[in-house]
Image: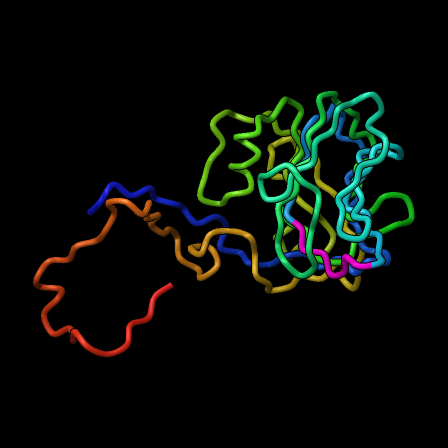
Amino acid sequence: IGPFDLILGRQTNRISKLFNGTDGFVDVGDISASIKGISFWCRPSVVVSHTDSLLSLNSSDTITLVNDQVTTAGFSGATVTRYVDGVAGSTLVANVWQHVFVDSDTGFSASDLHIGRAGSVYFGGYLRDVRLYTGTVSAGDIASLADPGKTCATALETAGHWKLESSHPVTAFDSSGNANHGGMAAASVITDVESPVPFSFANEFGYSSSLFFDGTADFLTFPASIKTGLSTTGDFTFF
């Protein structure tokens, strides 16, 4: 067997939260933390002639999707860089899972955290795996967060992590260990949906792990006992 990297499948639960765009959001409230990095996966339903609010740390510092552009408001005095799928940029497309990271060189208080809403504007589409960081996150680690097959090079200072994959009807659980659990609107406006998720094929098809081939010298060999009886012609199926 070649020198493979083993990619462990993440949670086998494939539930994602579908926000209806009118009154569904997660109300976390004050998490008593100063935030420099915001990471999440999203799949907006509409990006043309449309405005959606993705997240608000408080009444002033917000992340909004204006048409197809991830924009920020507030963050006074800070240098803010937006990333999409691990690369500096701000353009999203509809009905596709994309990773978004908003990086600030200054910390801002998450004193009234809302996921999927800012003021009276809501998000329509899927949101998943929302994380807030108190420390500086390098460009390399941002790229790793956008790639399910990679792990971050450094231990990140996580203030909150809401996977949004639980089927619990009223609670968005915080997986960071800080117990910053959020309250969700009624199940009629935030729906549990079996949907494509932005994680590894191992997770997507229910397996616990998969192998990563680097394209240079990786391959599998099998003993003769396994080959016995196998036909060398016909169709083959694989993921």
User: Compared to 67, does 235 lie above or below?
Assistant: below
Q: Nearer the viewer, residue 22 or 3?
A: 3
Asked if residue 162 can be seen in this view, the reply is no
- The answer to whether residue 170 is left or right of residue 12 is right
What residue is at 67 percent from the left and 55 percent from the top?
A: 43
Q: Position of residue 88 (x, y in %)?
A: 64, 36
What residue is at 57 percent from the left and 34 percent from the top?
A: 142
Q: Position of residue 55 (x, y in %)?
A: 78, 42
Asked if residue 150 can be seen in this view, the reply is yes
Residue span colored magenta: 42-48
Q: Nearer the viewer, residue 102 or 13?
A: 102
- The answer to whether residue 79 is left or right of residue 7 is right
Q: Nearer the viewer, residue 2 or 185?
A: 2
User: Compared to 155, does 220 lie above or below?
Assistant: below
Residue 44 location, quadrant = bottom right
- Residue 220 within the segment the image draws in magenta: no
Q: Position of residue 225 (x, y in %)?
A: 8, 63
Q: Position of residue 175 (x, y in %)?
A: 60, 39
Q: Nearer the viewer, residue 221 or 130?
A: 221
What residue is at 57 percent from the left and 29 percent from the top?
A: 139
What residue is at 59 percent from the left and 44 percent from the top?
A: 85
Quarter holding the C terminus is bottom left
